[in-house]
Amino acid sequence: MSIAPSALPISMRRIEKRFGSVAVLRDLNLDVAAGEFLTLLGPSGSGKTTLLMILAGFVRANAGSIKVGGDEIITTPPHRRNIGMVFQNYALFPHMNVFHNIAFPLKQRGVGAAETAERVEKALDLVKLKGLGERRVDQLSGGQRQRVALARAIVFEPRIVLMDEPLSALDKGLREHMQIELRALHRRLGMMTTVYVTHDQREAITMSDRIAVMNAGRIEQLDRPETLYATPRTRFVAGFIGESN
Ligand code: ADP
């Protein structure tokens, strides 16, 4: 695997998160290698989204440390973390056109008009939406919206990309096609460190360098897909990996 010089590792240590009196993440440790495509896989309610939101900075952990390339970011606000995020519902602005949706993070960062135009063009090209900049988002298909959300996440060339069930709204055929495209995009972007969330075992096995299986706020096992499949360490992992949807 060739790792881009800009890809950075992530190291999360002793992360705790409670909502009220409910512990959602318990003493959680996670290392993601530079350039890796790592998936958080687990049933609904196991804490995957919360973990991703803590990495992105939208949710504050009660305790713990997050280092990216050695720098502590646990108190850094989201827009200064240099992390791109694709949300489950895409969170696009439906009344705005494709160009302005993708340009949004650049505007937030004070990038000038000429550079913005250039970067948006490049992002549109990468997600295969060339020529659709003027189209309103509410006139796009589900798959096209998904690509706009992806372009917006990568347009400012973040060091890390986080994706929360980005394909769950698509039908099966398109979902399988986009799985292949996402992996190809990961390669084209020079192996940007990626943390991907899904509850779909098959999707995780198809796409990931490694999979962290989550259960009730803990990581039960973190391994390569074939290792998880061949040598599950707990009954939960064996049952969950063995299930097919
Ligand atoms: P997953 O992504 O694996 O489905 P989540 O991280 O969304 O899991 O949720 C983990 C647990 O935390 C669930 O029990 C959920 O109800 C709870 N939870 C998540 N967000 C909040 C919140 N803002 N307030 C209270 N409880 C929450």
Image (cartoon, helix red, strand yellow):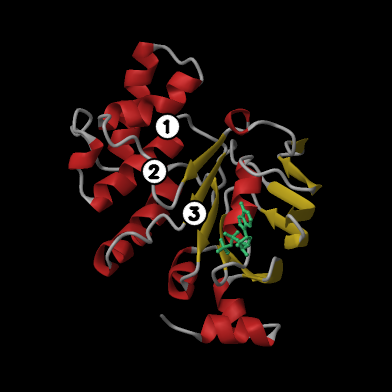
Q: Secondary structure at mark 1?
A: loop
Q: Amino acid at mark 3?
A: Asp
Whole-percent x and y of residue 15?
A: 77, 53
Q: Secondary structure at mark 2?
A: helix
Whole-percent x and y of residue 236?
A: 64, 83
Which residue does the numbered mark 3 point to in the structure image?
164
Q: Quadrant of ligand 1?
A: bottom right
Query: Label 1, label 2: how many angstroms apart (C-alpha)?
Result: 9 Å
Q: Are marks 3 and 2 in contact (CB under 8 Å)?
A: no
Foreground of the two, 212 or 4: 212
Residue 186, above or below 242: above
Q: Which mark is residue 155?
A: 1
Foreground of the two, 92 or 245: 92
Q: Secondary structure at mark 3?
A: strand
Q: Amino acid at mark 1?
A: Val
Whole-percent x and y of residue 46?
A: 62, 67
Nearer the camera: disc 3 or disc 1:
3
Nearer the camera: disc 3 or disc 2:
3
Which residue does the numbered mark 2 point to in the structure image?
150
